[in-house]
Image (cartoon, helix red, strand yellow):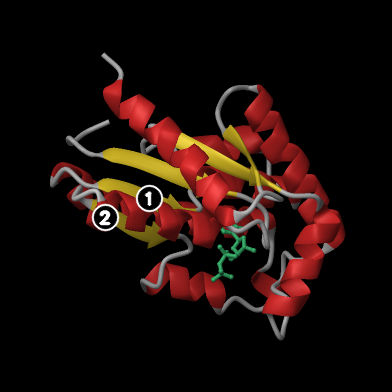
C-alpha cells in the first residue's frame, strides 16, 4: 500500500445503510480535525457511468466484472491513491468486495474476479454491514421508485452469503446493520482509531 493515508471500505447489500455509515464516518473524522474523503463505486466517471447505462444484453456478470474492475483501477489511480498520498483517510462506499459478492452471486468465478482486481490494493480496513434480506427489501422499497438490476431477493441472498464467507475468512469486519446508525458509526470509528493507534 502506498501513501500515508488509510483506506477504509464499506460494504453491504443494497439497503444495508453503507452510504449513511461511510458519510457518517467521514464527517466524524473531519469533526476531529483530521483529513477524510468520501468516495463511491461505481464512480461517476466515464466507466462508472457506462456501467450504469448498460442494457440487458450487456448484463453478463463477466462483462460487468471487467467493467467494475476497470472503473475501480481508474478510481484508484486518479482519486484514491492521490488522496492517500496526501494523508487522507479515504472511505470508499463499495470496493473490490462488491464485485466478489455481486458478480460472484451472478456466476462469475471469484478467483478470476480477484485476479482482475489485483492492481488495486486491498483496503487497510473493510467493514461489512449485515442486514437480513427482508429488511433490505423493505428499505429499498421505501427509498427507491425503481429497484436496481441487483435488488432481487435471490441475488441479494447469494451476495449476502458471499459477504458472510468473507467475514469468516477475516477479510471483512462485521457490523450489525439493524442497529441505529449512530451505534454502527461509533463502532466503526473505534475500530479505525484502534487501527491508527497500533504500534
Ligand atoms: P450502490 O452502492 O447501491 O449505488 P446507488 O446508491 O447509487 O444505487 O451500487 C449500485 C449497484 O452496483 C449495487 O446494486 C451493487 C452494484 N455493484 C456491483 O454489482 N459490483 C461492483 O463491483 C460494484 C462497485 C457495485
Q: Which residue is mark 1?
A: 91
Ligand 1 lies in quarter: bottom right
In the image, 51 versus 144, the foreground residue is 144
Rendered location of residue 197, percent (x, y): 28, 23
> Quick check: can you spot residue 91?
yes
Identify the secondary structure beneath mark 1. Answer: strand
Q: Could you give the CA–CA distance between mark 2 and mark 1, rounded to whole angstroms?
A: 15 Å
Q: Which residue is mark 2?
A: 31
Side of 44 where 35 appears, left or right: left
Rendered location of residue 44, percent (x, y): 40, 72
- In percent of the image, x 37 and y 60: which residue is there? 39
- In percent of the image, x 80 and y 46: which residue is there? 158
Q: Residue furthest bottom?
A: 145
Rendered location of residue 131, percent (x, y): 74, 49
Q: Residue furthest top?
A: 199
- In percent of the image, x 34 and y 41: which residue is there? 7
Q: Quadrant of residue 70?
A: bottom left
Side of 190 where 160 appears, left or right: right
Q: Quadrant of residue 52?
A: bottom right
Amino acid at each position: 500500500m502506498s501513501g500515508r493515508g488509510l483506506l477504509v471500505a464499506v460494504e453491504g447489500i443494497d439497503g444495508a445503510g453503507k452510504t449513511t455509515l461511510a458519510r457518517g464516518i467521514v464527517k466524524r473524522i473531519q469533526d476531529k480535525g483530521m483529513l477524510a474523503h468520501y468516495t463511491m463505486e461505481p464512480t461517476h466517471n466515464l466507466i462508472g457511468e457506462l456501467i450504469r447505462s448498460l442494457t440487458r444484453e450487456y448484463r453478463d456478470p463477466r462483462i460487468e466484472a471487467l467493467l467494475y474492475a476497470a472503473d475501480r483501477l481508474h478510481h484508484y489511480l486518479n482519486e484514491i491513491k492521490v488522496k492517500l498520498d496526501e494523508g487522507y483517510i479515504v472511505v470508499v462506499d463499495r470496493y473490490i468486495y462488491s464485485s466478489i459478492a455481486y458478480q460472484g452471486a451472478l456466476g462469475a468465478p471469484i478467483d478470476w474476479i480477484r485476479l482482475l482486481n489485483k492492481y488495486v490494493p486491498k483496503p487497510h480496513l473493510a467493514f461489512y454491514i449485515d442486514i437480513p434480506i427482508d429488511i433490505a427489501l423493505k428499505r429499498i422499497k421505501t427509498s427507491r421508485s425503481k429497484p436496481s438490476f441487483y435488488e432481487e431477493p435471490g441475488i441479494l441472498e447469494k451476495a449476502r452469503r458471499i459477504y458472510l464467507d468473507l467475514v469468516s475468512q477475516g477479510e471483512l469486519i462485521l457490523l450489525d446493520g439493524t442497529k441505529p446508525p449512530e451505534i454502527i458509526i461509533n463502532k466503526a470509528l473505534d475500530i479505525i482509531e484502534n487501527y491508527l493507534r497500533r504500534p
